[in-house]
Image (cartoon, rainbow, N blue to C red):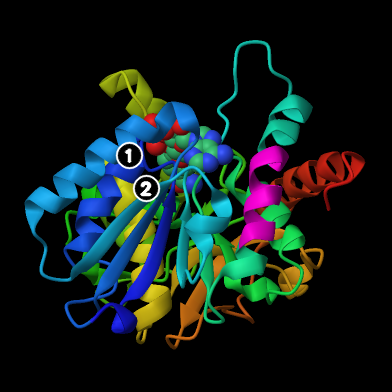
Amino acid sequence: MASSSTTVTITGAGGQIGYAMMFRIAAGDMLGADRRVRLRLLEIPQGMRGAEGAALELQDCAFPLLDGVEVTDDPRAAFDGCSIALLVGARPRGPGMERGDLLAANAGIFGPQGEAIAAGAASDIHVVVVGNPANTNALIAAHAARDVPADRFTALTRLDHNRAVGQLVQALDVRPDEIEGVAIWGNHSATQFPDVSHATVRAMPVVEALAARLGDRAAALAWLDETFVPRVAKRGAEIIEVRGSSSVASAANAAIEHVRDEQRGTGATWTSAAVVSRGEYGVPEGLVCSFPVTSDGSGYRVVEGLDFDDRSRARFEASVAELVAERDAVRELGVV
Ligand code: NAX
């Protein structure tokens, strides 16, 4: 039995998002009811008890698809034979910490994890980085895992994508599955550009549907600029303010959907994910940047050939400039 199961590694498994995702993964929500899973939970020594406790609860669920759970604080053991890695554990920004300090602390996590992936992961390894700063952490891990094809490394912007769809659902009073073609461009940060210019609702352009609801096209564009874009980009802060704690279940859900669609395919529609740029849309090669993407089950590919108006282009470029600055900062540290 064990040989036919897929090894899934979750880092930061003693934390909140790790806890929220592991039960759904073990229940088959990520890889489907036809794929058995073996979970590896990686923590640092301080987080081990939390992960061990979660492993006990997994046993108590007696999930039919779960072939075993191992908890470790050794990255080499955690990634040995792993086919899917969800890199959730990261160093949060502490008081007075500058961006350079934050990037350096995370380089000390994602560099060694990338090396451990290269050393022992299965040949079909796919990695999604959730821990922030997610795009640049993915860049660091991909760089450290030199023998692994760069397109196996992605970072999570599916939560931003889902947040954008959620806002349109509220504004247009429609179902989520009636909306297609939303795209998140750039960094998973407040500079990201949530773009609806190619999006449709019940096959009608979203901008037209908004115009019909709000009065005219100018009102629709004003709502997009002044309400939609900032609300999606700053939704994480809004959740913290209202809930008193950061996004957890929605982040876990987004990570599960990211892997599910990458592995099982996106079908006729696209989603958003941060992938290693091959120069698409003028984004410097090697940056881990969010784009609209599709998958046929073998990995995400950027949807090419979409057009931008000048304002959209300027927004996207501002977010790419932030990614370049983050890359330059980690270059100074000598890790990429
Ligand atoms: P928690 O602080 O609850 O959990 C993080 C866990 O990671 C802790 O248990 C810690 O011990 C562990 N950890 C730290 N360094 C580690 C290492 N080197 N190896 C293994 N484990 C390690 O945070 P949580 O709420 O779960 O959030 C996790 C990360 O997700 C944060 O970086 C957060 O900023 C990021 N997020 C990313 C999102 C995205 O869309 N990309 C959205 C949600 C979330 O904000």
Separation of residues labelled 2 and 1 (CA atoms): 7 Å
SS class, disc 1: helix
Q: Is mark 1 within 8 Å of ligand 1?
A: yes
Q: Residue beneath label 1, please? A: 51
Q: Is residue 115 magenta?
A: yes
Report the quarter where the N terminus lies: bottom left
Q: Is residue 162 visible?
A: no
Give the extent of the magenta segment.
107-116
Q: On the image, which quarter does residue 151 sit in?
A: bottom right
Kind of residue sitting beneath label 2: Val
Judged left or right of residue 323, residue 81 is left
Which residue carries the number 2 mark?
71
Q: Residues within 10 Å of mark 1 (few under 14, many from 20)?
A: many
The amino acid pointed to by label 1 is: Ala
Q: Is residue 50 positioned above or below 37 on the image?
A: above
> Is label 2 in contact with label 1 (beta carbons under 8 Å)?
yes
* Residue 71 appearing in the image: yes
As rendered, which of 82 and 222 lies closer to the eye?
82
Q: Is residue 259 above or below residue 251?
A: below
Give the residue drawn at x 69%, y 29%: 102
